[in-house]
Image: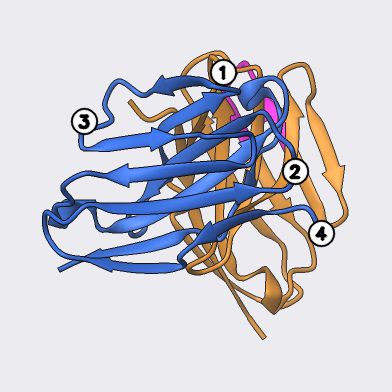
Chain colours: A blue, B orange
Amino acid sequence: DAMVIQNPRYQVTQFGKPVTLSCSQTLNHNVMYWYQQKSSQAPKLLFHYYDKDFNNEADTPDNFQSRRPNTSFCFLDIRSPGLGDAAMYLCATSSVGLASYEQYFGPGTRLTVT
Amino acid sequence: SQQGEEDPQALSIQEGENATMNCSYKTSINNLQWYRQNSGRGLVHLILIRSNEREKHSGRLRVTLDTSKKSSSLLITASRAADTASYFCATDAGGKLIFGQGTELSVKP
């Protein structure tokens, strides 16, 4: 089945230690998104790729970076995680025209910062 | 600034009852979408309603949209224990989705 896959599902990192979360998709969608969701809150868009074009949200901290080496894969890099970065990180995809179409979400990676 | 506000924040009902959740938003939209999130999981798309539509049905789901009041509602009929989840509205505002805070629905068997 076509899907969005996130690895790992659970990630523990130390304060200040760089961490990378990965997302892959078999849907061949041209848009990929990264969201941060803290407990009992709405998902918050960090950035998205429209094909290879990177679009950063204005309030996304510089600590967060992303890479999309090809259509199928997208990575979220947190350069120096702080305690406030502990959250669920959701990857999503959509086809063609950004949010005008439904988004397909992966199961998420829950990040713990110790 | 948050686009969508949801009401109620939490809802507890018995199996077989109907559940209604409301969403209000602030600016003009292209469409409004509803998503479900089971505890600790990703979001699943339920239904999309375009700005020129007033009502849409999908199985036991009924969504209404009132653009004059900038509000939408999601009705789940004949609820089941498996409907227990958080439900989010999301507005398409200028090419990205902005999610509301969500309604946490608990359906007791």
From where the camera sits, is residue B100 visible?
Answer: no
Along the viewing direction, whichever of A68 and A56 lies nearer the viewer: A68
- State how far apart marks 4 and 2 are (Cα): 9 Å
To which residue does mark 1 refer?
A: B95
Q: Position of residue B30 (x, y in %)?
A: 65, 17
To which residue does mark 4 refer?
A: A1
To which residue does mark 3 refer?
A: A62
Q: Amino acid at mark 1?
A: Gly
Q: Amino acid at mark 4?
A: Asp
Along the viewing direction, whichever of A83 and B53 lies nearer the viewer: A83
- State how far apart marks 2 and 3 are (Cα): 29 Å
Marks 4, 2 in one chain: yes
Crowding at dot 1, Cα within 10 Å, few <14 / some 14-19 / many 20+, comes out as some
Residue A95 part of the magenta-drawn span: no
Quarter-of-image position of residue B90: top right
- State how far apart marks 2 and 1 are (Cα): 20 Å
Q: Amino acid at mark 2?
A: Leu
Residue at mark 3: chain: A
To which residue does mark 2 refer?
A: A27
Along the viewing direction, whichever of B81 and A9 lies nearer the viewer: A9
Highlighted magenta segment, given as a residue range: B64-72
Vertical placement of residue A10 versus B65, above or below: below
Q: Position of residue B84 (x, y in %)?
A: 61, 71
